[in-house]
Amino acid sequence: MSETKAPVKLKDKWRQKKWYNVFAPAAFGNVEIGKTLADDPQKLVGRVLETTLYNITEDFSLLHVKLHFRITKVEGDKAYTMFIGHDLARDYLRSLVRRGGSRIDGIFNMVTKDGYKVRVGIIALSAVRTKSSQKRMIRHLMEDTVNKKSAQLLYDELAQQLVLGKIASEIYNAAKSVYPLRKIEVRKSELVEAGSPVQPAPQPEAQPPQ
């Protein structure tokens, strides 16, 4: 007769689990963004957590910006993450749309100075209807701006500028000469492929006095 294993009690499984504190990367101040349970720290690696920019900055006006972080390593009871993207709350995006205006959407691929590949979704809103030719020009300016900007920035720098609205502001300033827009937002970003983090240059050894 085959032996039947006694079922593992649910309470025993919970007793084996431990709480870990999860931290944002340096680009977001290394602040604690939450806690998570696991019975093995290695099971945490690759886990994705979501928080809001409000929870990091304590700026209530940024509550609609949702951030996504992936756990990359665990040391003791601390789990460390990397930024893998963001998106804006649907209710916030719906609130931007006005009757009588136009919505111009664009999806673009960016490559940072350190080789990270990022896909972004950008939305532009006008107060009145825009022509097809104007929409094409605005999309061209979107793509040109994000490509030039990403080539100048490291991934951590780009992440900050995406979620804080700096990239959107640069697109707005470039596009307003073509058509007066009411609002531009980077509504979503996603890390497609990781690059190679830039290591600090080694400091030259001090020479003994002659």
Image (cartoon, rainbow, N blue to C red):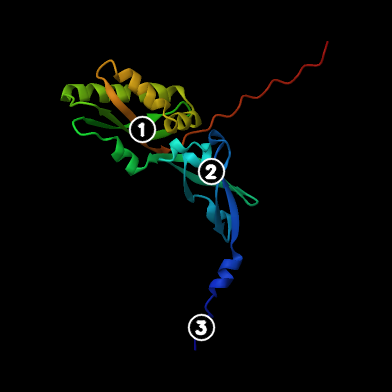
Q: Which residue does the image show at 38% across and 40% down from the upper left?
A: 87
- The mark nearer the N terminus, 2 or 1, is 2
Tell me the quadrant of the picture where the C terminus can be found. Answer: top right
Q: Nearer the viewer, mark 3 or mark 1?
A: 1
* The image quarter in which residue 209 lies: top right
The label number, if any, that marks residue 186 in the structure image: 1
- The mark nearer the N terminus, 2 or 3, is 3
Q: Nearer the viewer, mark 2 or mark 3?
A: 2
Q: Mark 2 belongs to which amino acid?
A: Thr
Between residue 52 and residue 24, name the one nearer to us: 52
- Cα distance between the residues tagged 2 and 1: 22 Å
Q: Which residue does the image show at 26% across and 35% down from the upper left?
A: 97
* The image quarter in which residue 119 lies: top left
Kindly state the secondary structure of the residue where label 2 is placed.
Answer: strand
The label number, if any, that marks residue 4 in the structure image: 3
* Picture coordinates of residue 136, whole percent (x, y): 21, 24
Please tell me how many numbered marks the rendered image carries. Answer: 3
